[in-house]
Image: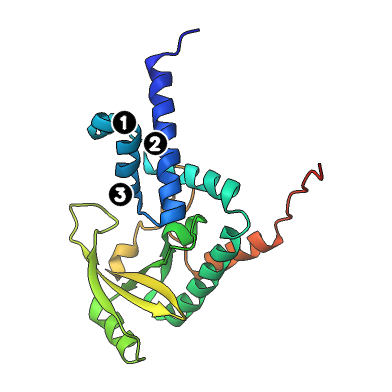
Amino acid sequence: MMPTPIDDLSLLRTEIAAVAARLIARDGADYASAKRKAALQVLGERADSANLLPDNAQIEAAVRDYQALFLADSQPARLLALRTAALQVMEALAEFSPYITGAVLNGTAGEHDDIELQLFADSAKEVQIYLLNRNVTIDISETPHFKGARFDPVETVSFLWHGEGVHAELYEKHDLRGALKARADGRPQRADAAALRSMMTSSATTPTPLQDPT
């Protein structure tokens, strides 16, 4: 049977996702730049054809596959270290209703990843003053609002926590309404400290699959 155009398109997207996954897992590239570089490598002049590109969910799945194949001896320990640090900083910032997002939440975090948080307070200044009063050096930038482009970007404070990078997006308290919807694939988009602790406990008690000695 001859392959159909749909089959060809699926194979192209799979190939681009695999190349992007390697760039993310090995080099620490973000999803957008990894997708662009992978598309150029696979498609050449056709790289601008958006309909040929995999979505972020497919790339995330490819990252999981890559880590399972090539980083199984190091990535789980790195993920646990990041989640442990994330839980500590979330407990320290408990009054700002912290939620964790990104690769540390979805389980694909590796050696290049930082901790991504979302905080909900009466004002961004309140969080900044809290950190500065505790001698935490912060950098301030902006991040697109998680609700989309029609909302103004939010301030983001970046700092080190016991050697780990943390990027905390600062939202107003009312932004928390409707923020806990799951992704299209059912995975959480963000989780509070209790949910993260539960995930870590569940991972620690999950039995390791038996390996074929042959």
Examine the image and state in which quarter residue 180 appears.
Answer: bottom left
Residue 16's mark? 2
Q: Nearer the viewer, mark 1 or mark 3?
A: 1
Circle 1: element type: helix
In the image, what residue type sits under mark 1?
A: Leu
In percent of width and height, residue 59 lies at 42, 43
In percent of width and height, residue 212 lies at 79, 43
Residue at far top of view: 1
For image coordinates 60% across by 64% down, the residue present is 77
Q: Nearer the viewer, mark 1 or mark 2?
A: 1
Placement of the C terminus among the 4 image quadrants: top right
- Other-residue count near label 2 (Cα within 10 Å), few / some / many at <14 / 14–19 / ≥20: many
In the image, what residue type sits under mark 3?
A: Ser
Q: How many marks?
A: 3
The reply to whether residue 58 is in sight is: no
For image coordinates 29% across by 63% down, the residue present is 175
Mark 1 touching mark 2, by CB under 8 A?
yes
| Distance between mark 2 and mark 3 Cα atoms | 12 Å
Residue 33's mark? 3
In percent of width and height, residue 32 lies at 31, 48
